[in-house]
Amino acid sequence: MILRSRGRRILQVSGLSCCAWFFMLSALAAGVTPVSIEFDDMDLRAAIQILADEMGHELLLDESVNGSITLHLEETYPLPALERVLASHELSMRWRGDLLHVAPPAVFLARDAEAQRVQEAMAALQTEYMQINYADVAVIRALVTGESDATGGLLSERGSANMDVRTNTLIVRDIEARLEDVKVLLDELDVPVRQVLIETRIVSAATEVGRELGARWGAFSGVREPTATDPGDDTQSVVAGRTDSGFRFLADHRRPTTVAANLVRRRLLLELELSALENSGQAELIARPRVTTQDNVPASIRSGVRIPYQAQAGGTAGGSITEFVDAVLSLDVTPLITPDGRIIMQLGIRQDSVASGSGDIPAINTNTVNTRVLVNNGDTLVLGGIFRDEKTREEIRTPLLADVPLLGRLFRRSQQAARRTELLIFITPQIVSP
């Protein structure tokens, strides 16, 4: 090793003799001056001791510190040189007055944990009754005690947390420092969650109505899932092929399993068109359910019938019992409010219908669709492509003459008509204040 001071004093020693180093360093000035250092395969403990002596501090080395060091530095100070030596061997140092303690970081962490444990064991316990205003007290308690996988718990070894579900109160007994940690957690989590009002219109319309609207406002061309690169406020980020009217659909009526999703940006246009179609008899508003749910909380809307049928009763007595099978139109939606104020909706749609010729026990045809779309706040998503075939029998009569006995049969006849309708679902999410 060669250690040179700015005063051109040069000391050079080869090998690993620590005693020689101590004598040579004692010849240097006591003040902290820049030095040039060359450690060539130097014993690590000896190198740290030399630099500590150069700074004028006592040294406490952990017994796990060992190895060798090769380091060449020009015109540096002892403290930066020591930091370089410790960093090369992943060591840490701490000061206690004039005493310099060097050890691996794990040693300091273990000693800190032990010191904290002793301090907490000596501290007095306090009890706090914390009112939970918006969150679920059971969820908060699980986070505080460590029962939840989300955190490792905030309590000390002597701490405890209980809850009063009736008043939504969290009862925590622990030292003051841990109580403050719990309060910080509550400040972050016990906040009002934004809500989403989901308004749904279920409309039954003739298939030609869908074709007319598609030709009038532009055909639907596709939907994709939202991504992180979606632009700010244009619905083209959700549905390609948007026309100037902001309305486009529909699905191919020749493919009953096709479901199309579309957006309506002008709600007034939608209301006027639906009203006109209903007044002309081309469409029928079946239901208009509304539901409000919290951000990222699932909501369900269901409409349908329960179909009774006779089933064989068990036991030796025989007989039959009446049971029911459900045929419903269900909509499951989970809204997620994005940071920029838009809404991601995870949608699950199920349409049941009774199969023809199903026998004594009704068979149910089921179509399900799952999709994920991104819409602006207040926009209307249109889901189409759910078709229903209806067969009706109607009687055509000649007034008065059809009621004449015997001869009246000549003036009335019945015919069977088939009609295909499309079920359109309009979903409008709206962010509301909690």
Image (cartoon, rainbow, N blue to C red):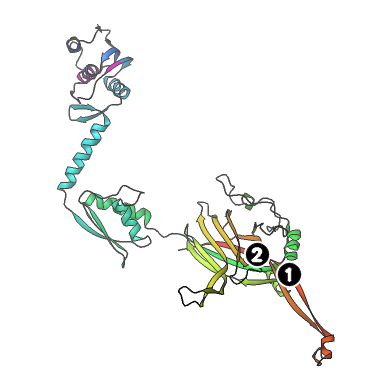
410 in relation to 6, above or below:
below
Query: Three-letter amino acid code at disc 2?
Result: Leu
User: Is disc 2 placed on a helix, strand or loop?
Assistant: strand
Q: Which residues are magenta?
A: 47-69
Q: CA distance from mark 2 to mark 1?
A: 16 Å
Residue 428 shows which numbered tag? none
> Label 2: which residue?
424
89 in relation to 340, above or below:
above
Q: Position of residue 408 (x, y in %)?
A: 82, 89
User: Residue 66 falls in which quadrant of the image?
Assistant: top left
Query: Is 64 part of what is drawn in magenta?
Result: yes
User: Mark 2 or 1, which is nearer the eye?
Assistant: 1
User: Residue 19 falls in which quadrant of the image?
Assistant: top left
Residue sitting at x 37%, y 58%? 190
Query: Three-letter amino acid code at disc 1?
Result: Arg
> Label 1: which residue?
419
